[in-house]
Amino acid sequence: MSRPQEPHRPFFHFANPFRKNSRKGSQFNPKRRSLLNDFETALSKKLQKLVPNDKGDILSLSWMKLAMVSLSEIHCDIKNLITELDLPVTEWDEKWMDVYLDISVKLLDISIAFTSELTRLNQGHLLLQYGLHKLESDSPELFSRASSSLDSWKQHIGSKNPRVETCRPILEKLVESLNLPKVKNSSKGKELMRAMYGAKVATTYICSVFAAAFSGSSKNLLDLTVPNTLPWAQVFSDVQNTVNVEIRNILSCGKFTVLRELDAVDACVKELSTLLQDGVGTSERESFKNSVSDLRKTEEKLSQGLDNLLKVVDSFFKIVLMGRDALLCNLRKAGGAVPDSVIGKNV
């Protein structure tokens, strides 16, 4: 595995950020409180962006891209916070590292599942392109081939992806990670634990939205409860309620797909399929050309949206992977012993 060019630090801490502790050194100090406040303020702003002015934007590919970019930025903010707190990686015990690596593996697995589904959806682009080429030729002799290509696209898009089916158990494990017992305490740990909790909640929830969208099942959509004492709790609650209500409304309609751009293409395909089945006579010529033009526009928007989303999911995958790599690198640089169990889990 390649090594990062700059010292990254892993971004998950595994402890209860709300457990009372009277030990000296667990008190907040002004500088660390300021760092925590900055992180939580930034977290609130990133979450707030996920509530669009128009609810119809929810589950559009552009909205999903925004959600994944926000998640990547939250993880980068955590990395920066750890750097500012200067919490030595040598203070991490073996159990802590094992838990971190276990959760990061799950994030890698779920990212791979998302990438697999986006790639599969993008593969349908060739079928649409072929069908459009035949339709735009304006040759009735080729319309039967175009119709067959459109039918193949619908079958391809409507098929199930086994990798997406693995998201459910991964999400269950991520939810469990939100309530892990404290492993280790330090004078700087309380601030870090609170920040990490926010990052874990955002990560788990956004991953559940993606899993619900790609599977077409509300079973993957989580309803998380967070302590209302946290400054970002109300914003998170607003985001979760708004997004979950909209997604469940879409799913209850029994649509072919919940992805906005994909649904738009499907509507155009249905319209053209009906026209081709009924026959394109002289009176239907203008309507037929408009439908072909609409399919071309929606297909291009879908293809671009899938490409853009695929890039940001890949970027998130790399951030998680570098976090795992950084844990081992920092241990070695600090002269700490790397447990065999940790090395065994490295990818």
Image (cartoon, rainbow, N blue to C red):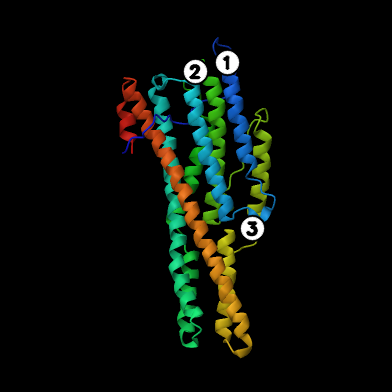
* Mark closest to the chain's N terminus, 3 or 1: 1
In the displayed structure, 183 sits above or below 228; it is above
Sort mark 3 into few (<14), some (14-19) or many (20+) by Cα contacts within 10 Å: some
Residue 6 horizontal/vertical position (percent): 39, 31
Amino acid type indicated by mark 1 = Asn
Label 3 and label 1: CA atoms lie apart by 45 Å
- Which residue is under mark 3? 250
- Which residue is under mark 2? 185
In the displayed structure, 7 sits above or below 127; it is above
Sort mark 1 into few (<14), some (14-19) or many (20+) by Cα contacts within 10 Å: few
Label 2 near label 3: C-beta < 8 Å? Answer: no
Residue 283 horizontal/vertical position (percent): 64, 88
- Which residue is under mark 1? 21
Residue 30 horizontal/vertical position (percent): 60, 16
Amino acid type indicated by mark 3 = Ile
Amino acid type indicated by mark 2 = Asn
Label 2 near label 1: C-beta < 8 Å? Answer: yes
Asked which secondary structure carries label 1, the reply is loop
Asked which secondary structure carries label 3, the reply is helix
